[in-house]
Every structure is written in C-alpha cells, then in structure tokens.
Image: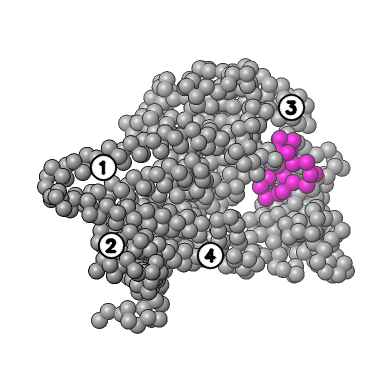
Amino acid sequence: MAIDRDSNVYTIVFATIMVIIVGGLLAFIASSLKPLQKANTTNEKMQNILQAIGLEEMRELQRDEAGAIFNDYVKRRITINYKGEILSDKTTEDVIDPLDKLDAFNIDLRKEYTRFVKPIMNQNKGDDEAIKAALTASTDIHFPIFVCKNNGKTIYVLSASGKGLWDDIWGYIGLSSDLATINGTVFDHKQETAGLGSKINEAWFEDQFIGKIIAENGKFVPIEVKKPGNDLNNHQIDGISGATFTGVGVDEMLGRSMEVYYDFFKNNSEFSTVSNKKESHSSKSTGAVRLKADTNITMELLPFADNFDLFLLSYSDLEIGDSRSFILSGIKFSAGSANINKHSSTKTLEKIVEGLKTMVGAQVELSGHTDNAGEEEALLTLSKNRAEAVKTYLIENGVDETQITTEGYGASQPLASNDTQEGKDQNKRTEIKIIK
Amino acid sequence: MSEEKKSEPLFSKKNKALITNPLNAINPVTIQVLGICSALAVTVQMDNAIIMSLAVTAVLIIGNVLVSLMRNIIPSKIRIIVQLVIVAALVIIVDQILKAYVYDVSKKLSVFVGLIITNCIIMGRLEAFALGNKSWASALDGLGNGIGYGLVLVIVAFFKEVFGSGTLTIPGLGKLTIVPEYFYELGYMDNGLMLLPPSSLFLVAIYIWVQKARTPELIED
C-alpha cells in the first residue's frame, strides 16, 4: 500500500472523515425517528392521565388508543403556580400546542422537579421551613390540573414528581370532587431498582391509594407510605418491602404537591363550593355511600380489607334494622379445610375485632361461600365450618358471643362464573353482614 | 493462504466452532469473565435478560463486521477510539430505534442499553477477533459470543426471577406465575436477596462450578 497508515496525517484525516460520517448518520437517524418517539411519549402521558382517573374500563387502556379518547374525558387543563394563581386555563376546544409551555399538558413533571424544586431543596437542606418558604416564593414551579368528567362525575387528575432512590419518580393522582378521596393513581420511575422500587408502577401498589383520604376536618393530611406490615388508617398505605427510599420519595412528593393543590381548591370558590354543596347535600351522603359511587363499585358487597374505615363508617351510617355486607377478602383457609391460614388472615381478623368493639349493639352474621368444586352437601358443611372458625377466633379475642351468628351457603351465592379460575377465587369467600 | 480461505464453505468446521465455542469452552461471561456487569444488573426479570441479550448480540455482530471490513484502513494508533466510536454509534442507533418502535421495551431497559457501550464483550471481541479476521468469520464470532452471553443471562435470570418473585416474565406471554399461591399460604416466602445484584454473583459462580464439573478440560491447574 502506498499510504503510510502510521503517519500522523493519515490518522488525522481518517479521524476527521469518520467523525463527519458518524455524526451525520446519527443526526439523520435521530431526526427521522423523532416524530415517532414524540408520539410515543405524548400518548403515554395521555394514557397515564386517563388511567389516574380511576375508571375500571381504563385499566387495560393501550398507549396508542389514549390519544383518540383523551378529549372525551379531559375537559379542562389548568396550570397553577405555588401560590395557587391560575396561569393557563384551556378547554377541549383549545388544541394542545406543543410550543405553549404553560399548557397543563406540556408541563414536564420531571423537569419541574429537577430544574426548580431540587435546587431549592439542596440549598436549604435540613431546614424544612426555609424550603417551604423558598418553594412558595418561586414562580417557576407549575402544577397541572386535568379536570375530567365521566358520567356526570368530576375527577381532578393532579401530578407529583420527586426523587426515588436512584433517579426521578413521578405520578398522577385522581382526586374526587369532594377534594379528599383519591380515586386512582399512576406512578412511574426512571430507574428504581428492578424488582424492588420499580414496583411503584404496578397495580397492587397504585390501587392501595384508592379510597384513601387527603383531608380531615377541612385540613390537608398527607398520605403516608408506611413500612409494610403495619396497621393502616385511611391516610396510610403499605410501602414496598426492600424499597424504603422509593417509598420515602413517594411520601415526600405527594405531601409537597398535594398540599398546593388542596389549598388551591379550597381557596378557589369555583371548586370548593361544588364540594361543599355536595357535602351538605344530605346526611346520608357521607363517606361510605359517596366513596362507593365514586369508585364505581356497583356491587352491594365491598371488599373489607382495603376499606376498614368504610366498615366503621357504614355502621354509624345505618338506620336501625338496616344491614350491610362486606367481603372479608383477607381471610384465607387451607385448601378444603376450615383451618384459618393465620399468616395471611390475622391482620383482617384483628381489624374486625377492633371494629366490632366500637359497634355497640351490632349483630353480625358471618357467612361462608365456596366455588362449585365438590358435593353440594360437603360444600355447605365446609362453608358453615369456615364461618364457625372465624366466629371462634372473634370470641377468643373478646367479641361477645351473642352478637355473632354464622351461616354456610356453599356454592349457592356465586359472585362470578365458576368457569374460570378467577371466578372461582372470587366465589370462595367469607362475608360479614353487620345489622344495626 | 488467502486462496485456501476462498474455497472454504460458509459453515466449515472452523466456522461452526466460532459459534459453538463461546457457548461453553470460551463462554464470554463464565470463562473470559467479560460482560459480568450487565449479567449482574439486568437479570431480575427474564424478559429484560432476553431483550438485553438480543441487543448485545445485534451490536456485537454489526460491530464485528464493520471493524472487520475496516481492519485494513484503521490507523493502529487510534484503533481503540475508532472501535469505541463505532460501538457508541451503533448503541445510539439501537436505543433510538427501540424508543421509536418498541417504546415499552426501551423504558424497561432504560440505561442498560447505553451501557452496552461499556460491555467488555463488545470491545473485547472487536479488539481480539474482528481486527484480525474476515467479516464472515467476525459475524459468526459475534453471533456465538452474543448467544454465549445471552445463555448465561437467561439462566441466571430464570433462577433469580423464580426464586425472587415467584414469576417468569417472558416477552409475548407476559408474567407467568410459577410458585403457586398454595405455597405462600403454607408460609413460603420469596427470597428478597434474589432481586439484588449480589445474588447474580452466587448464581454465576454456581454456573461456573457446574460447567467446569461437566467439562474437566476447563479446569486450570
């Protein structure tokens, strides 16, 4: 070869040509794929917002479908700042303009946190008062509100962003128009530990928030993420075991942002009068009934495990002689026997005991139900024995024997079809009926 | 020598060995101890391991072929830098394509796609093989090493996911429950350690043990 491949000139020329070719190629590919990538992120955002409303039919919503139905649900897009001033207020008639930085849809949650919130937090590390003052003074921080309407109900989809263990975490929260009850959530993360912190975007974690309350006696109460295994009240949820810092992050970002939203709604007559009216509407529409309507549970039976407070509320809500039933989904038995599985059931059982002690004069009926696998006779006996087992536990733990009756219904009252495993699992259950 | 090579069939014994050797005798992870970092990090779920293996294999084959084609014009003084630029460009292209066409997968792999650049297997094979061999042989070498890497990843991921989460996540099939609910009712618990990177070290070590026990020739003195 004529060219000396070790010469400096050759090396420099080679390097220059290579850089130009590679640079041009990358620029070309990046710009030609950009529209596709942009559509993906936009659709994902719409999907997240729609899912945070908390409607059952949205659970399986695909990313590509979100764009088409977004405007059917999201009727208004409002942007506010820390002081609660409205900076932008758009309706469905205003098309989302990607260049309009103030449009609620264009607010980049992660940027809000890293560009504006994080520096303030770092500067005033450890001094919570100073952080709050500086955050409040900042005019850069924006909060989007998506006013969603469905079947005459209004849900506000709000957002929060903060820091997990490794990088940003963010989420959308659907708040009922009572300005207290959470109706649905969607969380996501950049790179939390796979299998641990990364679980914040899984349904079991997100669903815990449904029915939790962010206000008490007209004051804001933050949602707390507790270590798993604790008893929870209606402002607390179970964290992810092994992912303490991700939980702390969720806790922090929710507390910080939801308070701003709460104050905004309370101080803005347009939103708070609606909710006041609803609250004073009639004494019957307190807690239990409203929550039921808002979470779309049409069944008369409510899962007890997630709604202990509802269980308590229900009783105070009942007229003398009325009754209400709950499914004790937390109580499990060993297969085919009436032995209570202590490990998974104790928490629920303890709660029932605690609850019954506050319900003076209540009568309860415990009933067992099974799927259709087996002889009818045997199923009736099994379900009766299971109800008896729960009764025995309650009596041993101090509930008055005369308050409790038991019943075994076998397979006679299925909730779902016995043709699928899922249906069968649903039919195998213990119910509690409280009678005032 | 070049004449002799021309007549060589595409899948000669020698070329086949280029694919099969990296599966066992010179496995990049367990024997050459390359690419350990991602073997530790992306093995919590099966689907991530599979997709990561595919991405590494693709980058490895294309990178090997490109470097092999250019092996006579790359200035030796800056050959490492040239290889780096090629690999980096390929990884960026893979990342951009994933983001545009399989967005969910790109979200799952997030930083790990970028980290393919630092995967020692790739630089190692470019430097050790592609620089001195023809492009067809280099492609086979890339394929073999990619599969060898993927094999370890998938096996490690299998045990980590089954024992760590009780599930298996397979692309196209979704999350399959492996450990029945009945076990949990009896008091069985998932092993949390399996979800953390260190458990991969144990599993890779056990893998090497089994491998060397089965092929005694691999045992060094």
Relative to A428, A132 lies left or right: left
Evaluate if marks 3 and 1 touch, with contact meaning CB atoms under 8 Å apart: no
Magenta highlight range: A291-313
Circle nearer the N terminus (3, 1):
1
Badge number at residue A379: none
Q: Residue at x 64, y 32 (%)?
A: A68
Mark 4 vs mark 3, foreground winner is: 4
Evaluate if marks 4 and 1 touch, with contact meaning CB atoms under 8 Å apart: no
Q: Residue at x 39, y 66 (%)?
A: B10
C-alpha distance separating marks 4 and 1: 46 Å
- Residue type for callout 4: Val
Residue at which label 2 appears? B133
Residue at which label 1 appears? A18
C-alpha distance separating marks 4 and 3: 46 Å
Evaluate if marks 2 and 3 touch, with contact meaning CB atoms under 8 Å apart: no
Would you say residue A306 sits in the magenta stretch?
yes
Badge number at residue B162: 4
Residue at which label 3 appears? A152
Any part of residue A108 in sight: yes
C-alpha distance separating marks 1 and 2: 21 Å
Q: If the image is split into quadrants, where does the C terminus of chain B sit?
A: bottom left
* B171 lies above or below A216: below
Circle nearer the N terminus (4, 2):
2
Q: Does mark 3 fall on the same chain as mark 4?
A: no
Q: Does mark 1 fall on the same chain as mark 3?
A: yes
Mark 4 vs mark 1, foreground winner is: 1
* B182 lies above or below A367: below
Q: Does mark 2 fall on the same chain as mark 4?
A: yes
Residue A319 in the image, given as x and y percentages of width and height: 83, 38
Front residue of this view, candidates A301 and B183 = B183
What secondary structure is found at the residue carrying circle 2?
loop
